[in-house]
Image: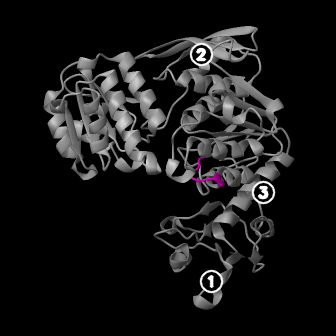
């Protein structure tokens, strides 16, 4: 396995990167670690402090398991508080999490100094992971060795965790940057300064932290203030938020018609097999694209990724590459259950915009008499939560459904919105999160061959539990 840049760093270089007071014990490490249960010889353990745990409480455990390097809060003075084994490298810092980000920043800098390297950063209210996977696949098709965000590790801890896996062979890093509050994207942008930036969209997500759509736009726009950007790729739907930014001359706008931009998509067709559309580049080149992912909204995600990569493409090269795109679980995943029921598992997360797109998809690929919806609460919407859930209920009724299951504390608001839009109370069932089984028991006998069931809600609702309750199988 290729040696990482982190593994190549000696203790002195690590101490400098961390901004640490160091006890001058020299060694090299094979990996960074936060989980004390997995600690072993060759690990550098970061004693992170969270809401429910403090890594400093587990230092004896990591020492017992052979770990001989720790990053700790300098205020804890662990050398007098416990028996530290001889030969243990101790790095004392002002803040362990901040120091971890500094280490990742240094690793990226070391790779840049080796030459021929670029960082792509992706943020947005929806579509970050899908766009990341498409972008990484396209770059690999161009012969690049790509380090990409694994899963959804896109926060203060997750982003550095990905970066420390960087090796000299990596040509490109494709990194998601997520946020729940103002300032978080700016912090991540500092850890991993991007060369190319993408904002997928701006929508009503995490309004409890951002306060408004405009607040969301400002927070996502923190990415665009990176000092050395070479290219910015944005959908035209965000133009009102970002048209006047300092780096406006570096923006490539991607629209849905020639009136929007010279780079645009149109003729979008979506069905149960995927989407097809035309991608127009600079008003001179047209590509016929076939993307085997569900949902018309993914046409824009692909267009943003293609625009970010740039360069010359043939239709065959694009479409062949897209066959290799694989999304993490829970994003419009197709499952099956008896009797010949299709389940769309989109329960990784949810906000008003992604709910709207999911309902639009099921309206495209199914008839109302075969359409069942299991909709969970959308979290972190602040004072707008009740109205957002009533709107969701109205949208569900407008697209039509055979049965609607509402789960979570806001289930009554979803139901109220649907009833106000004309849905029948006989077709709606509400339940708290811990009574999901009762909801499935109500729904299951009413399903028939040919029905399609959408499962979608915020991560905290854990609606993927419904899959086992249905006895569903993927594929």
The residues colored magenta run 178-184
Q: Mark 1 or mark 2: which comes first in sequence?
A: 1
- Residue 113 horizontal/vertical position (percent): 86, 48
Magenta stretch, main secondary structure, is loop
- Taking the spot 64% from the left edge, 32% from the top edge, the residue there is 136
Confirm or deny contact between disc 1 and disc 2 (CB under 8 A). no
CA separation, marks 2 and 3?
37 Å
Quarter of the rendering containing residue 32: bottom right
Which residue is denoted by mark 1 in the rendering? 76
The residue drawn where x is 69% and y is 77% is 90
Spot occupied by residue 137 in the image (x, y as percentages of width and height): 62, 29
Question: Counting residues from the N terminus, which is met first, the one under dot 2 or under dot 3?
Answer: 3
> What's the residue at 42%, 33% (across, down)?
355
Above or below, 446 relative to 316: below
User: Is 475 situated left or right of 40 in this image?
Assistant: left
The mark closer to the camera, 1 or 2, is 1
The CA span between labels 1 and 3 is 25 Å
> Where does label 2 land, which residue?
319
Of 374 and 121, which appears nearest the observer?
Answer: 374
- Helix or strand or loop: what does disc 3 sit on? helix
User: How busy is the neighbourhood of tag 2: few (under 14 within 10 Å), some, or many (20 plus)?
Assistant: some
Q: Which residue is mark 3?
A: 106
- Looking at the picture, tell me which residue is in the foreground, 53 or 23: 53
Task: Find the residue positioned furthest to the bottom.
Answer: 80
Within the magenta stretch, is there residue 180? yes
Q: Secondary structure at mark 1?
A: helix
């Amino acid at each position: 396995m290729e040696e990482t840049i982190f593994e190549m760093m000696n203790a002195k270089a690590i101490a400098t990167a961390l901004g640490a007071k160091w006890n001058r014990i020299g060694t090299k490490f094979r990996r960074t670690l936060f989980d004390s249960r997995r600690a072993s010889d060759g690990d550098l353990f970061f004693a992170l402090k969270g809401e429910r745990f403090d890594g400093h409480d587990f230092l004896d455990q990591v020492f017992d398991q052979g770990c001989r390097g720790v990053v700790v809060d300098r205020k804890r003075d662990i050398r007098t508080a416990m028996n530290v084994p001889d030969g243990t490298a101790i790095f004392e810092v002002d803040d362990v999490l901040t120091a971890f980000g500094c280490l990742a920043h240094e690793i990226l800098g070391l790779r840049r100094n080796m030459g021929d390297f670029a960082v792509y950063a992706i943020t947005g209210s929806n579509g970050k992971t899908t766009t990341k996977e498409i972008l990484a696949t396209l770059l690999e098709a161009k012969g690049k060795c790509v380090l990409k965000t694994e899963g959804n590790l896109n926060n203060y801890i997750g982003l550095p965790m990905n970066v420390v896996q960087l090796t000299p062979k990596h040509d490109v890093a494709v990194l998601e940057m997520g946020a729940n509050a103002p300032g978080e994207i700016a912090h991540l942008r500092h850890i991993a300064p991007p060369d190319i930036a993408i904002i997928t969209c701006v929508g009503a997500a995490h309004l409890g932290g951002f306060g408004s759509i405009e607040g969301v736009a400002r927070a996502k726009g923190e990415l665009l203030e990176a000092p050395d950007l070479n290219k910015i790729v944005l959908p035209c739907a965000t133009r009102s938020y970002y048209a006047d930014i300092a780096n406006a001359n570096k923006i490539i706008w991607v629209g849905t018609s020639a009136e929007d931009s010279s780079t645009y998509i149109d003729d979008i067709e979506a069905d149960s097999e995927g989407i097809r559309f035309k991608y127009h580049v600079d008003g001179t080149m047209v590509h016929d694209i076939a993307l085997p992912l569900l949902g018309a909204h993914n046409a824009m995600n692909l267009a943003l990724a293609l625009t970010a990569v740039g360069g010359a493409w043939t239709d065959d090269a694009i479409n062949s590459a897209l066959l290799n795109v694989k999304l993490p679980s829970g994003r419009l995943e197709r499952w099956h259950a008896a009797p010949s029921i299709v389940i769309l598992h989109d329960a990784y997360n949810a906000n008003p915009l992604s709910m709207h797109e999911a309902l639009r998809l099921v309206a495209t690929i199914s008839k109302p008499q075969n359409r069942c919806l299991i909709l969970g609460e959308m979290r972190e919407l602040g004072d707008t939560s009740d109205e957002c859930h009533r709107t969701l209920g109205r949208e569900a009724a407008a697209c039509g459904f055979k049965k609607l299951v509402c789960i979570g504390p806001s289930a009554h608001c979803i139901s109220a919105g649907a009833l106000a839009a004309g849905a029948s109370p006989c077709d709606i069932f509400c339940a708290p999160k811990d009574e999901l089984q009762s909801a499935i028991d109500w729904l299951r006998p009413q399903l028939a061959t040919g029905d399609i069931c959408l499962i979608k809600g915020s991560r905290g609702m854990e609606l993927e539990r419904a899959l086992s309750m249905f006895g569903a199988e993927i594929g």
